[in-house]
Amino acid sequence: MGISYKNLDRTAAFSELEKAAPVDLKISLTAERIKSANISVGGGLTYNYAAKAVNDDITSILQKLADEQELIAKYNELLAGEFMNVGENRKVMHQMTRGELAKDVLFEGKNLREFYRAQQNKIYDFVGKVHGGEIKGSTGKPFDTVCQIGIGGSDLGPRALYLAMANYVEPILDAHFISNVDPDDANAVLERVDLETTLFILVSKSGTTQETLANKNFVVEMSKKAGIDGFDPSAHLIAVTSETSPLANSDDVLAAFFMDDFIGGRYSSSSAVGGAVLSLAFGKDVFEEFLSGAHEADKAALESDISKNAALMDAMIGVYERNVLGYPSTAVLPYSQALSRFPAHLQQLDMESNGKCVNRAGESMNYSTGPVIFGEPGTNGQHSFYQLLHQGTDIVPLQFIGFKESQIDFDLDYEGSTSQAKLKANLIAQIVAFAKGASNDNPNKNFPGGRPSSLIVGEKLTPRALGALLAHFENKVMFQGFCWNINSFDQEGVQLGKILTKQVLGGGEMDEALVALKDMMSI
Amino acid sequence: MGISYKNLDRTAAFSELEKAAPVDLKISLTAERIKSANISVGGGLTYNYAAKAVNDDITSILQKLADEQELIAKYNELLAGEFMNVGENRKVMHQMTRGELAKDVLFEGKNLREFYRAQQNKIYDFVGKVHGGEIKGSTGKPFDTVCQIGIGGSDLGPRALYLAMANYVEPILDAHFISNVDPDDANAVLERVDLETTLFILVSKSGTTQETLANKNFVVEMSKKAGIDGFDPSAHLIAVTSETSPLANSDDVLAAFFMDDFIGGRYSSSSAVGGAVLSLAFGKDVFEEFLSGAHEADKAALESDISKNAALMDAMIGVYERNVLGYPSTAVLPYSQALSRFPAHLQQLDMESNGKCVNRAGESMNYSTGPVIFGEPGTNGQHSFYQLLHQGTDIVPLQFIGFKESQIDFDLDYEGSTSQAKLKANLIAQIVAFAKGASNDNPNKNFPGGRPSSLIVGEKLTPRALGALLAHFENKVMFQGFCWNINSFDQEGVQLGKILTKQVLGGGEMDEALVALKDMMSI
């Protein structure tokens, strides 16, 4: 008994996978295959892998690999509160923010589920008072805008989710985001908002993030400079931080809501980090629906049969593509303009989690880990980088996302079809074009095909569907990390840059290259 | 005499390059190297390649390769009006839209330079009347907003450039963009603009782009539905198209401005495609300054000495990284929030131009061509995907861009430094961290280093600098295409998807996979 951790290339299943006969997508993508290769994601979404270069032989080996690497058991350990973030000796609790899948987890006498729910309830209580006009700006005007100040996980996820919902649900408060330390970012956002009616949310787990503190200072100083009679910056600022951070009990803020070290930044959209801004923008019910969708996907990911577990299938096919077929990147292609920044969130989620070159035990490995992730919404991408995807020298696996209905009900017929029908027709045409290609006597117009894709499809991009979509990818990344035997929950790779930045700004001793570059950039 | 075209792997210089001893960046990035590895780009920008894994031996072989592949001679042929887009039998004339570098080029009796200038002057004349209030909306209100309807090259470049300038130059008309055929895109933009004061620009070279025509119809029908007394949609719509397109003489539009087949979509930002929207937004002077910067970079790219030609050096180092070192992707990392969508433009420019698997003569090749391009602004990216860049199993070459000053003059000191100083300190810290890495007894905190980057640096992101930046990358991509012996100016890879989309919407005979997917998506 006990779970064992071993490298991918030490498993019997991986050796078997390397020997498996490859699948010719030009032949395998049949109508029958499309109808059968479906798995429920949760949240009303379906994952279809018909256009992936796998068959029953390969998926049965992927099942063996999942079993041999004990992926579901490891997920259960994570849910049970084991210290899965081994490098930092932390639990990994983001799934707990959206529902109950395991027994209660206690830490230093604290029940974590109760803690996360209590924070979210405190947020709802606060949100109710803001929406009801009980909490107003310092000059007596009700708040109509919320502005998140945060970077990385405090920005990308919440921003992508806000944009994904803002056309479907009329925002109660419009949301803006300041992230970059570039002063042009804060200046531009501050020009667009009315300070008297804007509530700022300062988001930093440690309370020490350089960019976020500089931008907080920027906002506070700018509001002082504005010289508004009776204006009090601290009445316009709330914090989302950890209980031990300097912001937890600061006089600078009206209220503070808490997360903890067991919620990683890139996994924090369903915690207070996303909860404050999204429930201020859309209200409690929308955020709860979003959480329920994420919980459905978390629950579906517990299934040990790979043919019934979308996140597991997606993860294992990804490992096959990365480590057997040798594909170095993956494109995320949502056919929904509302998901315009969702690929940027997944880029962080995936690349920061699995862009690692040492295993869980700190040993280097002989195989590739996380791929480069990029993407833009379709059909826009079709007129941009799809040329390389169709006819480039490298094969890039594709993750399509589509919905039967648009978010906004209004649509128009033009030349025999609505815009939504055109959008969907383009999506399915691409799947077939990538998989099957097309021969042409003109080599310039020849399409080699054999380019794999999968499709996540739903009725409509609702908060519930969005929650499931988010959790699906989080769980996919988690399973891949387990399979590669790496720690997907730390990010030590961001530290060196911070240290050298401090040296540059501190003006002490530093590498001669930094001195020369400092001079070049007039710092 | 005459220019010869041969595959990269047929050149003597490439064999030599493959045998060259690799450079250890941990040692080579010295202060002296940083001070000497600079080339003027034009537009006040400097390209620094000190942190690339090349030394004088390698750059001298790159010079030989550039000479052997006759890259400068090919550029001159292009400027002289040769049919460099061989697949489509077209000239390639985008550099001509921004200045004079070669003799006049005639086509079917038309002087192309005069044609492009005449179009731009017609635009300026029109813009003057809009800004002066001589041309008003149909209900008598002056225009305060412009909205570009276009996709791909008609969208990404102009949108990225608009965003890059909008904080530096106060827009005379605010600009919006509708691109995606997703009805949620048009609906969302139309909710934000006032139809009575908005001038729409319909941009499609062929006048037949499915998405753009559907969105034009969307805008026209929505404006009719709005039921505004006296509103005439045709008084709110101008076209940028080719002279032979259905839009050239349409009653639906107030005015039409022309481009031609010699300006590819992704190269069209300096033609009427960018010219109309950007001069409506910012005025003639700003657009002329932008063109002058681009022209400076075009001129600088004529230099045959690689150590004096930034675009050529950048291109050839890229070939070395792609074909000798085997790196499959490149990240573009502007430390300027104003360049937030510039990587998306470069993604199209590069991947659509050089994502090709047959050479100029239609033969397949035995080497890799264009890489995957992705990127986000710094410091945001540092808190996102930089983890993989520092510690992932693949090496990703990096293209940094930075400016000594921010666009908006206002800045604040916080803990001893301004936001702009922090931004720049982060940038240079990253260059050194990627190149030199850092050893640590904890393997989790170990940084292998040896990760190459280059830096384009300027005083400030002005229209002139922006023009040079754009042209630099266009010319880099052109040189790489010549070196790989491919046609960088067609995009046949986008056609198959269009054909299959028509089959789906037409409802005739189609592949069984399309039938099954059509059913699945409820089309």
Image (cartoon, coloured by chain):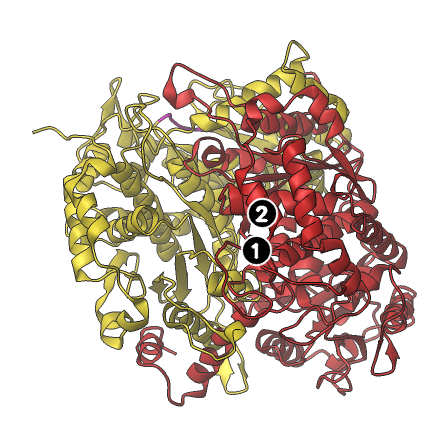
Chain colours: A yellow, B red
Query: Which residue is rendered at x = 41% and y = 67% of the image?
Result: A434
Q: Secondary structure at mark 1?
A: helix
Q: Nearer the viewer, residue A304 or B223?
A: A304
- Please say whether residue A258 is one of the residues in the magenta stretch: yes
From the viewer's perspective, tell me whether residue A356 is left or right of residue A217: left
Could you say which is closer to the camera, residue B517 or residue A408? B517
**Residue A136 makes an appearance in the image:** no
Q: Which residue position holds label 1? A: B10
Q: Chain of mark 2?
A: B
- In magenta, the rendered stretch is A256-261
In x, y percent, where is residue A233? 65, 28
The amino acid at mark 1 is Arg
Tag 2's secondary structure?
helix
Q: Position of residue B479 (x, y in %)?
A: 68, 54
Is B158 positioned to the left or the right of A297 in the image?
Answer: right
Residue drawn at x 73%, y 80% as measured from the top left: B233
Provide residue A280's location: percent of width, then percent of height: 49, 44
Q: Is residue B46 above or below residue A430?
A: above
Residue at (71, 50) in percent of width and height: B67
Mark 1–mark 2 CB contact (< 8 Å)? yes
Is residue A223 visible in this depiction of the protein?
Answer: yes
